[in-house]
Amino acid sequence: MIDLFVEWYVFEVPAKIKKIWGNYVWFFAKFFVLGDLVRDLFAPWKGLTFTREKRGLDFGDMLSTAFGNFISRILGAIVRLMFIVAGVAAELAAAVLGLLAFVFWIGLIPAIILCVWRGVYLLLIS
């Protein structure tokens, strides 16, 4: 009976914790699509680009078009950067919480043994 408990406690549950942890890391990587966000960082926001309206050397039209495209790209970069930061924070949180789950699970048996020993000790001295 003890061998079944040790096998469950030492092998089965940590494997399940690792699988769940991996699922969270995979989910956040796919949800935030960090690779695509980094690759398209300075792409125009929602593909919104401006084209010149007039032919020839109309500096006002050229400046308006350049400024509109610049603003669209900066806006796209700001929004994508916020999603990159949120994605990295979610990945780090998943990593830290998964590590804490492992530490908690490993420390649970010594804590239970300590509490039982302390309870028996308190019962015996009173």
Image: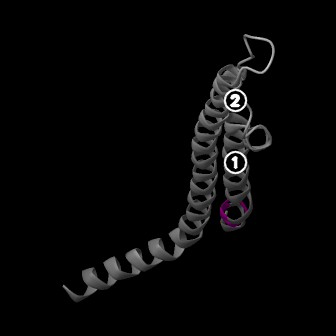
**Residue found at the very far left of the displayed protein:** 126
Q: Secondary structure at mark 2?
A: helix
- Tell me the number on the disc at residue 95: none
**Does residue 36 sit above or below 18 in this rendering?**
above
**Residue at mark 2:** 66
Q: Main secondary structure of the magenta part?
A: helix
Residue 85 in the figure: left or right of residue 35: left
**Does residue 17 sit above or below 71 in this rendering?**
below
Residue 36 in the figure: left or right of residue 120: right
Boundaries of the magenta span: 5-9
Image quarter where the C terminus lies is bottom left
- State the CA–CA distance, disc 2 to disc 1: 40 Å
Residue displayed at 53% across by 66% down: 104
Residue displayed at 56% across by 57% down: 97
**What's under tag 2, amino acid-wise?**
Ala
Q: Nearer the viewer, residue 48 or 18?
A: 48
Q: Nearer the viewer, residue 2 or 42?
A: 42
